[in-house]
Image (cartoon, rainbow, N blue to C red):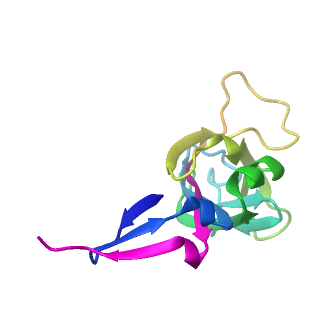
C-alpha cells in the first residue's frame, strides 16, 4: 500500500496491486536557449523550437531578433496506458528538439538540435538541464571549437494511476 495525505486532512491508501491501469506522461518544458547561431543578416535569429515525440509534433512561439530566447512553454505528451514498466520497454522514448530561425520568406533555417531518450530519466523527478545543441543537419564545415548554443529543458516522466476501486479514504483523527 502507498499512503498519501491531502491538504484537507484526508489520508488515502492506494493499493498498487489493484491498479489495473497506469497512464505514463512525459512533460517537456522548453525554458530558454543561449548563444544561438545568428541566421539573419542583422546578426540575430528569430528562433523557435519544434519538439517531436512518438507521433506528436508541437512547437514553441517565435521569439524575434535574439540569440538568447526565453520561451517558458511546457508540453505534455501521453506515452500510453498500461503498466508503466511494460510501456517503457515497448515504446520508443526518443525525443527530438530542433531549433529554427523563422523567416518571412522562404524556408526556415535550422540552427541546432538535441536528441535524447526519455527512458534514461527517473519517474517523478523533474530534471532541469542545459543541453548543448548539435549542428544543423548537413552542416559539415564546422570551425574548431565552434558551438551552436545550448537549450534549457525541464523534463519529467510521471505515472497517473487509474482505478477508483484501489483508493480508500480515511478521515484524519484529531487528538
Residue at image point 73% right, 46% down? 113
Residue 33 position (above or below residue 75): above
Residue 63 visible in the current orientation: no
Question: Which residue is rendered at x = 76% and y = 58% of the image?
Answer: 53
Report the residue that reaches farthest toward the top: 144
Q: Position of residue 122 (x, y in %)?
A: 58, 44
- Residue 149: which quarter of the image? top right
Up-down relation of residue 76 to residue 32 (above or below): below
Depth check, front residue: 154 or 114: 154
Residue 68, percent from left and from top: 53, 51
Residue 73 visible, this orientation: yes
Magenta residues, start to end: 153-175
Q: Residue at x 78, y 47 (%)?
A: 89
Q: What kind of secondary structure does the magenta stretch mostly adopt?
A: strand
Q: Is residue 154 magenta?
A: yes
Residue 93 position in % (x across, y down): 76, 50
Q: Nearer the viewer, residue 137 or 45?
A: 137
Total labels: the figure holds 0
Q: Is residue 30 left or right of residue 55?
A: left
Q: Is residue 8 left or right of residue 43?
A: left
- 163 in the magenta segment: yes
Front in this rendered view, residue 137 or 9: 9
Identify the residue at horizontal 53%, vertical 43% (top origin): 129
Amino acid at each position: 500500500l502507498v499512503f498519501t495525505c491531502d491538504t484537507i486532512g484526508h489520508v488515502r491508501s492506494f493499493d498498487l496491486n489493484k491498479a489495473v491501469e497506469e497512464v505514463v506522461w512525459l512533460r517537456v518544458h522548453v525554458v530558454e536557449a543561449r548563444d544561438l547561431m545568428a541566421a539573419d543578416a542583422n546578426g540575430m535569429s528569430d528562433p523557435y523550437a519544434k519538439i517531436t515525440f512518438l507521433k506528436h509534433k508541437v512547437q514553441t512561439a517565435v521569439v524575434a531578433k535574439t540569440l538568447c530566447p526565453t520561451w517558458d512553454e511546457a508540453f505534455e505528451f501521453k506515452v500510453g496506458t498500461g503498466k508503466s514498466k511494460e510501456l517503457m520497454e515497448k515504446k520508443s522514448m526518443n525525443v527530438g528538439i530542433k531549433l529554427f530561425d523563422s523567416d518571412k520568406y522562404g524556408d526556415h533555417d535550422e540552427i541546432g538540435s538535441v536528441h535524447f531518450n526519455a527512458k534514461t530519466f527517473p519517474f517523478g523527478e523533474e530534471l532541469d538541464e542545459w543541453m548543448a545543441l548539435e549542428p544543423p543537419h548537413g552542416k559539415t564545415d564546422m570551425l574548431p571549437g565552434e558551438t551552436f548554443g545550448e537549450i534549457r529543458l525541464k523534463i519529467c516522466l510521471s505515472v497517473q494511476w487509474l482505478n477508483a476501486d484501489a483508493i480508500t479514504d480515511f478521515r484524519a483523527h484529531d487528538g
